[in-house]
Amino acid sequence: MGDLDVVVVGGGIVGLATAWALHEAHPRLRAAVLEKEPRVGCHQSGRNSGVLHSGIYYRPGSLKARLCVAGRADMVAFCRRYGVAHEVCGKVIVATTADEAGALRGLNERGVANGVRNVLIDAAGLRALEPEVTGLAALHVPETGIADYPGVCATLMRLLVAAGVEVRCATAVRAIAERGDGVVLAAGAEEWRARWVVTCGGLQSDLLARSTCADDGVRIVPFRGEFYALDPARRGLVRNLVYPVPDPRFPFLGVHLTRTIGGEVHAGPNAVLGLAREGYSWGAVRPREVLDLLAWPGLRRLARRYWREGVREVRRSLSKRAFTASLQRLVPAVRAQDLRPAPAGVRAQAVDASGTLLDDFAFAESARCVHVVNAPSPAATAALPIGRLVVERLARRF
């Protein structure tokens, strides 16, 4: 065995960043990236809001906090170096009730603890930044930005290929067998052999992890996030990025309005249980995947705990009026006729057997494999340091 030193499974932004970190740290290693889709960055990497997150939301000391803060700076530097479109435009997190205004102070403290620059502002200060946004107070986070993440993926792929790393698309990994002297992968029509393997499978990450690790009860639950785009004539309602105060029980940030690097303004996403791991619409249903989730106790426990919130999300998915009402809490001038359908995304959210949403990035390791198990938002922002962390974990085996 030993056709390759390392195979990275998954050509999303985390997989590509991991392969790039591996090349930078160990340029002599022979490596390849295997991606099941016809091109890189097809799923979470190419179907997100394009936000460069600051790191303000995450528990101090957590991987999300540390890697997001470092990753934002790294991603800005990467985009500048390689000419990828990006902008550090800032955002506001808006409190529309007294309780939310109190929660803003907690977010401010968390941001300070994470080393994120942010400023509490009153209603007048909010109007100065976002004239059409209504709120009692807000947190201004000037370090937040937007980026062309598909462009980042394309650039990473170009750099890897130029460095001699093969990036093979349309090559789905069907099986991974770990042996004493290496790993055998059945992928595409071929058998691949490597000394070590890293998987960055996103929506398939738990399945890949269980190929070499004991089942720890964690499953990926797909949550579809649906977006609208503001009519071009109404884009002036939002200057940059406008967020609500998030519910601290969930890793989701709520329906918000974000200017994209292409000049559009997107509104969303909500969080509806997907009927397939890659289910980007209500019509995308894979019965076997649905039955597997329904048979799993973790989903039932999650549903019992949060069924009211789930009903609200489904209502917002099925009713444009309900979706519009959630936006009007932030921007009262938004009307239903201002909203045009935009491509949906699916968040790969890891949930444990107790029905608890995993809040932090998570990994699983076996003798010759490192699996990225949970890497939802802000993984695009944090991709470069996530890649370095994975390589550090892998290098313990060299």
Image (cartoon, rainbow, N blue to C red):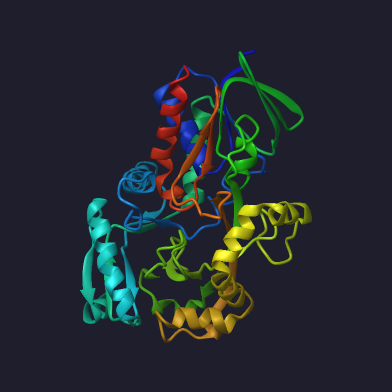
- Note whether residue 307 is visible: yes
Figure check: 193 above or below 268? above
In the rendered view, would you say 195 is above or below 361? Answer: above
Report the front residue among 238 and 365. 365
- Relative to the observer, which residue lies in front, 125 or 395? 395
Q: Is residue 342 above or below residue 131?
A: above
Which residue occupies 30% across, 50% down? 60
Q: Residue at x 60, y 59 (%)?
A: 301
When the figure is inspected, residue 90 is found, relative to residue 327, above or below; the finding is above
Rendered location of residue 50, percent (x, y):
46, 57
Please indicate whether residue 364 sits to the left or right of residue 142 in the image: right
For image coordinates 44% across by 22% down, the residue present is: 395
| Residue 298 placement, left or right of 393 | right
What percent of the width, then of the height, locates residue 206? 61, 42
Which quarter of the rendered picture does the N terminus lie within?
A: top right
Q: How many marks?
A: 0
| Direction from residue 177 to residue 50 in the image, left or right | left
The location of residue 265, given as percent across then percent down, is 46, 70
- Residue 141 seen in the current view: no
- Toward the viewer: 115 or 165? 115
Residue 386 lies, in percent from the top left, at 42, 39
Query: In percent of the image, x 34 and y 43: which residue is there?
Result: 74
